[in-house]
Image: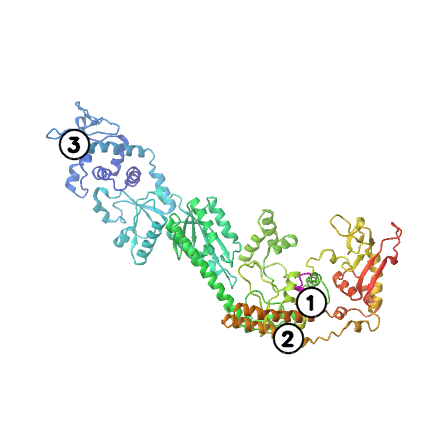
Amino acid sequence: MNDRLARLVLMRLAEPGDAAMGALVALRGPRQAVDLVREGVVDADLARRLAGGAPDPHDVEAVSRTTEPPRQGADLVRHGTASSQKSAEPVPVPVPVSVPVPVAGRDGSGQGRDGRLAARAARLDRTIASWAARLKTADPERDLAEGERIGARLVIPGDPEWPSQLDDLGASRPYALWVYGDADLRFSCLRSVAVVGSRAATPYGTHVATEFGAGLSEKGWHVISGGVSIRGMTTPRTRCVIYVRISRDKEGAGLGVQRQEHECRQLADTLGWDVLEVYADNDISAYSGKPRPNYQRMLERVQAGGADAIVAWHTDRLHRNPRELEDFIDVLEARQIRVSTVKAGVMDLDTASGRMVARVLGGVARHESEQKGERIKAKHLQLARSGKASGGGFRPFGYRRIYDRPDPPRRLLREELVPEEADIIRECARRVLAGEALVSVCRDLNRRGVSTTSTGIWTARQVNSVAEVGQDDIAAEIRARLAADEPAAAIARDLMDRGVPVSGPGKWSPATLSRTLSSARIAGLREHRPRSRHETKRVNIGEIMGVADWPAIITPAESARLRLMLSDPTRRVSPGPTGRYLLTGLIYCDVCKHRMSGHSKSGGRRHYMCDGLPGRQGCGKVSARTEYVDEVIVAGAVELLITPGFAEALVVDTGVDEGAVVAEIAACEQGLLDLAADHGAGEISRAEWMAARKPLQARIDVARQSLGRVDVSRVLDGLPGDREGLEAFLLDGEVEASRRRAVIAVALERLWVRPAIVRGSKKFNPARLVPLWRF
C-alpha cells in the first residue's frame, strides 16, 4: 500500500483534526500507522507518547527521538501488563491497548500528572478501538476510483499542489484533501477564505452562506471549505424543480420564461442543487384565477415526494392569490420542501415569521396586480373614447393592421380594409339579416375554404380534429399521446410551445361568426366592452363610444339590426332538428295546436309529427311524410313568390328614417358618456347619474327596435326569378334548410296539418294541409 492509499484509509478511520491520529502519522508515517491499527501492535514508548501528548511534527529532534524501531520483549504491552520474559519476535496484541502507568500521584491522592496520563490512556483505548472498527469497511481503491469518476483529485502532503499553510496545524493537519475543480489548490489558498457552518443548516443559513460565498468570489477571493469525504461528495444532492411564468407574452416566443429559467438554473447551480424538470406556464396570469396546468403538475410532483426544493425567479411568479399561497404553504410544510428565488431570496416556511413574510409578499403582489389592472382598464377606456384600436389579439377579419416596423416591439399606425374579406362580411350580414341560420352560413364558408384570422393556434378541438384525419408525423404523434391518456389541451400547449404549425386553416363556428357580425367595428364604430374581475367572459355587445378611425364595411343601420337580432335572448342558439327539416318552426298540429317537429322512422323515412311522448305538449295524433308536405308547400310558395308585384308589396314604408335613427342613437350614447364624465369628476351624484341615464337608455332601445324591423325583401336577393329555378332551389337538399326556410317564411306564415281521414293510407291527401299565406 502506497502513501496515497494509506492516507485515504486514514481519512476513513479518523475525524478531521484528530490529534491522536495526527501524532501517530507524524511518529510512524501513514503506512505504518495503518499497519499498527490493523495488527494491534503498539509499543509502550509509542503508547506513552500518544497518551501523553503528540509532538510537533516540525520539531525534527522530538520526532527523531520517537521514531526508533519498536522494542521487543519487556517493552511490548499485552492487555495492559508488561511481559517479564524477553522474546526475539514482537508479540501482536489486540486493541484496545492500555499503557502501564501509576494510578496515584506523588502524594498518593490519585491526582497530578500520573492521574491525567491514566485518563488519557483510557481515552486512547477507546480511540484505537473505534479506528479498528472503521478499518473493516475502508476501501481506498474504491474511493480513488469514485473520485476519478466525479472529476475529483486527491492531494497529499508533498504534492506540488499541497498548501504549505496547512503544515502550521501540526498534528491536526489534514491527512489528504479531495479537490474538485480546475484551479490550482496551492495558489488558490494564497487569497482564500473558508465559509463553514452547521451540517443541519436552515434554508436561510444556506442562503446566507451562498450570498457570502458569491460576494467573496466576485471580489477575487477563493472560497474553500472542507470536512467532506469522497462519500459525502457523492451523496445525492438536493433535487429541485424550477417554476417559471409570465403573465403576458406579446411576442408569443416564450422569451420571458426562457430568461427566468436561465437565472433559476444559475441559482440552482450555485446552491449545488440538481434540476429535475422545468415547469413553465407561458402567457398565463397567476392573478386571473385561470388554471395553471404546469403549476398544478409541479405541486403534484412535490406532494408525491418527487423533489426536495423549488426554484423560482420571484415569489410573485409562484402566487398572486392568497388562496393559492395557503395551499402552497400546506404542501411545503407537509413535505419539508425548500423554496429559493433569484430576486427575493429564500422563502423560509419553517417558521411563523417566515410564513408571515410570505403572506405579506403575496398580499403585495396581489395589490400590484389589481393596481395594474386598473391602469390597463383606464388606458383602454381612453383609447375607446378617442376611437382608436387597442391592438393585441388576432387581426380582425376584414382588416389589415399597418405597423411602424415589421417585428415586435412595434406600434400600430392604422387599419385598412382587406377587400375580399370585407365582401365576405357583407355577404354574411345580408344572409343573416335575411333569416339564414349562423350554422348554415358557417358550413358554407368552411366548404368554400374561407378561413378565420385565428389560423395558427392549437386548441384541444384542433388536436382532436388532426388526430382523426391527419396523415403526417404530427398527427401520428398526437394519436399516440391521446392513446396514452394525455389531455388534448396539454398536447395543444406543448405544440404551441414547440412552434409546431397548425394543420389546416381556422374554421368558422356560429360563435365566431356571431362575434364578428355583432361587433360595432365592422360599421366603423368604436365599441367598449369592459369586464369586471368577477365576470368570467366578456359580452359580445358592448357600449358604442363613437366613430372609429378605421373604415366601415357595413352601414350603422345594418349593424344595429344585426346586434339586435344576435343579442335577442329568445333567439335559438342550438340548431336542433331545424337544420334538417324545411318547415320546422312553421308547421303546427290542427288538433292540439302545438308545433310539430321532424323525426326519422325505420327505413330512413322522415315525418313531421306531433310529439305525444310523456313530458311533451303534443297530442301524438298527427303525422305526415316530409317529402309530400314539402312538395305541396313549395309549389304554393313559388306560385306566390313569382306573382307580379309580390316583391314590391313586401317593402313596407314604416316611415323610419334610418339616418335620423342612427344619429339619435349616437347622440344618446354621447349623452351617456358625458354623464359618466360628470359623475367621475364629482359634479353629479350617483343617484343623479342613474336618474339621467334611464331615459337615455330607453331612447336607445326604442331606436334600435325601429331599426330591427327586418326588410323581408332582402331574403329574395340573388334567387332565381323563374318558376322552375326557384322550385329547384327550395327543394335542393344541398342548400342549407335554414336558407330555404327563410324564403318559404316570406310567403307562409303558418301551416296547419289535419289528421288523416283513413289511417294507414299510402296515398297522401293534400287536403290535410291548411296553409296560412301572408298575402
Q: Position of residue 711 (x, y in %)?
A: 74, 70
Callout 2 crowding tier (Cα within 10 Å): few <14, some 14–19, many ≥20: some
Q: Is residue 731 left or right of residue 64?
A: right
Upstream in the sequence, badge 3 or badge 2?
3
Callout 3 crowding tier (Cα within 10 Å): few <14, some 14–19, many ≥20: some
Three-letter code, disc 1:
Cys
> Mark 3 falls on what kind of element?
helix
Q: Can residue 17 be seen in this view?
A: yes
Q: Nearer the viewer, residue 83 or 526?
A: 526
Q: Is residue 698 left or right of residue 125?
A: right
Q: Position of residue 526 (x, y in %)?
A: 59, 71
Can you identify the residue that label 2 sits on? 664
Query: What separation in Å lies between label 3 and label 1 (alpha carbons)?
Result: 110 Å
- Look at 14% across and 34% down and name the residue there: 113
Three-letter code, disc 3:
Gly
Image: 144 above or below 600: above
Q: Position of residue 756 (x, y in %)?
A: 86, 53
Q: Which of 38 and 243 is in front in this view?
A: 243
Q: Is residue 727 magenta?
A: no
Mark 3 vs mark 2: give the one in front: 2
Q: Which mark is residue 428?
A: 1
Mark 3 vs mark 1: give the one in front: 1
Query: What separation in Å lies between label 1 and label 2 (alpha carbons)?
Result: 27 Å
Image: 364 above or below 417: above
Residue interval drawn in magenta = 564-570
Callout 1 crowding tier (Cα within 10 Å): few <14, some 14–19, many ≥20: many
Q: Does the magenta stretch include residue 567?
A: yes
Q: In this view, does 585 lie to the left or right of 154?
A: right
Can you identify the residue that label 3 sits on? 115
The N terminus: image quadrant: top left
Q: Nearer the viewer, residue 515 or 768?
A: 768
